[in-house]
Image (spheres, rainbow, N blue to C red):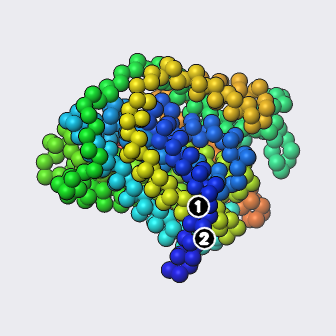
Amino acid sequence: MNDLIANLSLGFGVALSLQNIGLAFLGCLVGTLIGVLPGVGPIATIAMLLPITFGLDPVGALIMLAGIYYGAQYGGSTTAILVNIPGEATSVVTTLDGHQMARQGRAGVALGIAAIGSFFAGTVATLVIAALGAPLTKLALIFGPAEYFALMVMGLVFAVVLARGSILKAIAMILVGVLLSTVGTDLETGQERMTFGLPFLSDGIDFAVLAMGIFGVAEILRNLDQTETRDVVRQAIGRLLPNREDFKQAYPSVLRGTVIGSILGILPGNGAVLGPFASYTVEKKLAKDPSRFGRGAIEGVAGPESANNAGAQTSFIPLLTLGIPPNAVMALMVGAMTIHGIVPGPQVMTKNPNLFWGMIASMWVGNLMLLVINLPMIGMWVRLLKVPYRLMFPAILMFCSIGIYSINSLPTDVVFIGLFGIIGYMLIKFGFEPAPMLLGFVLGKLMEENLRRALILSRGSLATFIERPVSAGLLALAVFLLVLALLPSIRKGRDEVFVE
């Protein structure tokens, strides 16, 4: 306990420096802005802002990027409630009851309870990260290359099981991502692989290029493809603070949503996205009158929004302790850490305690900032919501091109984001989810590295993965989950859950 207090005081010392407070505020503000503006997600924004972080120290850079991530979760709820458009995938559920509350003249109460629930959930999730960080890191230090390889296989299997749509399509996306990660020069043999004799491919495909193309440019094309209808609420926003009756109805939902989101956020493979959906289903099942849901039930906003923010923060646990990104945003965080010469994993806590505990403390500071940013500035966000998307996309495209060119000063990178953008758009059109591909790309390099190390240590014996109990257990769990997910009855039930 004393160690935890000492570590948190170290973290707050780092997070409360003037520069880091400024970066956390900037991240939260940008995150809220992109959450409010439909069509620009945190993945595209973080990919666009990666070049800017080159000039910052690693702690400040990651604090800012983390602020963008959970700021977008807050901003997405504002759009969902006021315009009936989820600014973020995780805000889809909030539209069901949040917008109905807004149409009944209770937009302020819906926004207020979403902000308060998110703040409470974020605070609890930060404490969970602080409590689990040290034990998980100690556990991770006993991991060797074989265990890390098995853990990454399990992470990719979770990504398949938790991905929306067809399981076979998710597997295909992961395999494509792993294949793309092998493009370039083999570090051990010096042989070029899949470069087609093109010199600019000898260093491999740049992570930022792939991320910005598949998510940034593809998202722009997808939004231009859709006819825009914005049902901005005409009624007054009303009071922002919920009354005693509202609190009485909402607080059990906030508590349940926090627990559900915290648990699902830790799961590799985008478990955080499922938090709000699971919370809404639980609230509807437990309600005395389920027919109220979809007609402005405050529990339908409080539970999912709490689950959303809790999941967004606990998804940092596998990244910071094991070095495994559980979703596409965390994969970008791995990219940002690598750019700054930090190897994600258990060594982060021992070698960079300032980074580890500073990030955890900054999450609580960021949550407090979001409460201050969101509620008093509702009027400004409403005005921004009226800006048509056709006026925004040229600026977004310009920032993407400038940002990607500034990394390596290669014109081919700008061409590549356009190419990957078209590929990403086609994938979305054909029902393929691009997020598993990015996870496959990030984990592919790490998997190859650990596979080789494990085989060198065992003198080429594949039995090493089964002889080591932790590695064997993780691989057995991965196989069991995959077989379970492929069973027709389970697959049908899974599809029904995602549709619901």
Residue holding disc 1: 15
Left or right: 404 as drawn, with respect to 184: left
Closer to the chain start, of discs 2 and 1, is: 2
Bin the neighbour count of mark 2 within 10 Å (Cα to Cα): few under 14, some 14-19, many 20 and up. Answer: some
The secondary element bearing badge 2 is classed as helix
The residue under label 2 is which amino acid type? Leu
- Residue 446 position in % (x across, y down): 68, 52
Left or right: 83 as drawn, with respect to 141: left
Determine if residue 414 is in view. yes
The quadrant in which residue 412 appears is: top right
Q: Nearer the viewer, residue 69 or 383?
A: 383
Instruction: Residue at 27% x, 28% y: name it.
Output: 234
Instruction: Residue at 39% x, 44% y: name it.
Output: 376
Location of residue 269 with respect to 204 vertically, above or below: below
Q: Nearer the viewer, residue 297 or 108?
A: 108
Instruction: Residue at 72% x, 45% y: name it.
Output: 54
- Residue 283 position in % (x across, y down): 24, 51
- Residue 426 position in % (x across, y down): 54, 24
Quadrant occupied by the C terminus:
top left
Q: CA distance from mark 2 to mark 1?
A: 9 Å
- Residue 222 position in % (x across, y down): 49, 24
Q: Are marks 2 and 1 in contact (CB under 8 Å)?
A: no
The residue under label 1 is which amino acid type? Ala
The secondary element bearing badge 1 is classed as helix
Instruction: Residue at 23% x, 47% y: name it.
Output: 298
Determine if residue 249 is in view. no
The quadrant in which residue 409 appears is: top right
Left or right: 63 as drawn, with respect to 201: left
Residue holding disc 2: 10
Q: Nearer the viewer, residue 443 or 482?
A: 443
Bin the neighbour count of mark 1 within 10 Å (Cα to Cα): few under 14, some 14-19, many 20 and up. Answer: many
Location of residue 369 with respect to 38 vertically, above or below: below
